[in-house]
Amino acid sequence: MIHGSHVIVLPFPVQGHLTPMFQFCKRLASKGLTSTLVLVSDKPSPPYKTENNAITVFPIPSGSQEGKDPLQDLDDYIDRVYTSIKKHLPELIQDMKLLENPPRALVYDSTLPWLLDVAHDHGLRGASFFTQPWLVSVIYYHVHKGSFSVPSTKHGHSTLASFPAFPMLSANDLPSYVCESSSYPKILRIVVEQLSNIDRVDILLCNTFDNLEEKLLKWVKSLWPVLNIGPTVPSMYLDKRLSEDKSYGFSLFTAKSTECMEWLNLKKPHSVVYVSFGSLVILKEDQMMELAEGLKQSGCFFLWVVRETEMNKIPKSYVEEIGEKGLFVSWSPQLEVLAHESVGCFLTHCGWNSTLEGLSLGVPMIGMPHWTDQPTNAKFMENVWKVGVRVKAEADGFVRRDEIVRCVGEVMEGEKGKEMRRNAEKWKVLALEAVSEGGSSDKSIDEFVSMFY
Ligand code: UDX
């Protein structure tokens, strides 16, 4: 039943942000709240409706050349996205105010904190949606407050950073921008500024669940009334008995579904290493080859997502030699893959969505973080949730093939691996509980929806 209330939802247009915010719209739809998802896109198209007309996807032009990879110049892409939103959103809100069910709130990506004032200027409530967990955002908060000094590393040993309600963290465990502030100054500014007006935000939403960040959450909730609404994984992947809510939704890439699933169907339970580095990570050619050699030496089957733009780094001779032992695809239906019983572990960059998906589907992980929030997610994955191992890299960040072989062996065959699987199964149960009727995240969604009755 759609009761007529309506919110605007605006994600930053990269896959790792679009997916959770679109899934959030679907959860709202299931509770009777309609939404307009504003999609900054380089492919102009008219607005369209989905989820029984409960979600309207409204593309606005990014100003980028169609098909241009944002990573070619991330700073330029960010500027274009900002310009596009500043130009089109106010007009769009004005138009929507004339609708029979005008919007009541703007749910914006937390990386666009200036949208709070845009919301207020138009008489809307501002809800900041954090696509990354509190364990990352709180570190940015401490950086913003200036109450933190970056740990130093000498002779391979790092001093430790201490934050309230956190385990001790070495430089290696912190979000990359914090320690390498010179590499991406613009992105560091953006991630820190997310917290700049947090005290004024009307509603705080986060793609996590209460049990997962329990200890830290006590601290967070003492400061802000947050609503954790994750994991934003469609329920049917969390519990196969549930048949509704099938579509994962909103991909900027085309998945090779049939190819992946047919290949997995032929493999024994827990025999395949699934390898994926998400939508943005670019590995250097020598690192790709080292990983490839490590996977080969591990002797395990592997399904490896290598985006089209990256495939030139894997020699054809390697693919031929590997034969049936490995399958390369440019994009996979990741949730279906993780839910498949043949998958024994997930070698991941520990992007937040991937980490949460692995954990929610009970799959042990090997963390090979690259940048941004990934090192901190990997630290928690290994040491707090205890569902996997993190590869040990050399001082320059390079991961040797022997280390890949060691980690695959530990997770796929060792006693520790069995324990990790048991822990992962436990998190799977808790994730399902959180989103099921009456669970903590379900209640948070109810609370959000009730604000618009
Ligand atoms: C980015 C950042 O890199 C990440 O650290 C941050 O937490 C969110 O934004 P990304 O690198 O793309 O995201 O990684 P991730 O957060 O894991 O999101 C990737 C999404 O793409 C996941 O939902 C995953 O299921 C999906 N995916 C990935 C596929 O559907 N198929 C694939 O083959 C690979």
Image (cartoon, grey):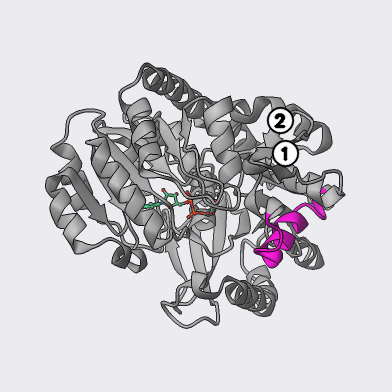
Please say whether residue 265 is visible from this viewpoint: yes
N-terminal-most mark, 2 or 1: 2
Q: Residue 190, position in %: x, y?
A: 71, 61
Identified at 76% across, 64% down, the residue is 114
User: What amino acid is at disc 2?
Assistant: Met
Q: Position of residue 95 (x, y in %)?
A: 64, 75
Question: Which span of residues is magenta-colored?
Answer: 180-198
Q: Position of residue 76 (x, y in %)?
A: 60, 77
- Residue at 59 percent across and 63 percent down: it is 12
- The residue that appears at 19% across and 56% down in the rendered structure is 319
Q: Is residue 36 above or below residue 406?
A: below
Q: Quadrant of the C terminus?
A: top right
Residue 270 tag number: none
Q: Secondary structure at mark 1?
A: strand
Which residue is under mark 1?
Answer: 226
Bin the neighbour count of mark 1 within 10 Å (Cα to Cα): few under 14, some 14-19, many 20 and up.
Answer: some
Is 221 placed left or right of 282 in the picture? right
Which residue is disc 2 drawn over? 168
From where the camera sits, is residue 449 visible?
no
Q: At which x and y percent is residue 394?
A: 51, 45
Give the quadrant of residue 84. Answer: bottom right
Pointer 2 with pointer 1, Cβ within 8 A: no
Q: Is mark 2 within 8 Å of ligand 1?
A: no
Examine the structure image and report whether residue 87 is included in the region drawn in magenta. no
Q: Is residue 313 left or right of residue 151?
A: left
> Is 194 a magenta residue?
yes
The quarter of the displayed image where residue 44 is located: bottom left
Disc 2 crowd rating (10 Å Cα; few below 14, some 14-19, many 20+) is: few
Front-lying residue, 313 or 452: 313
Q: Nearer the viewer, residue 281 or 118?
A: 281
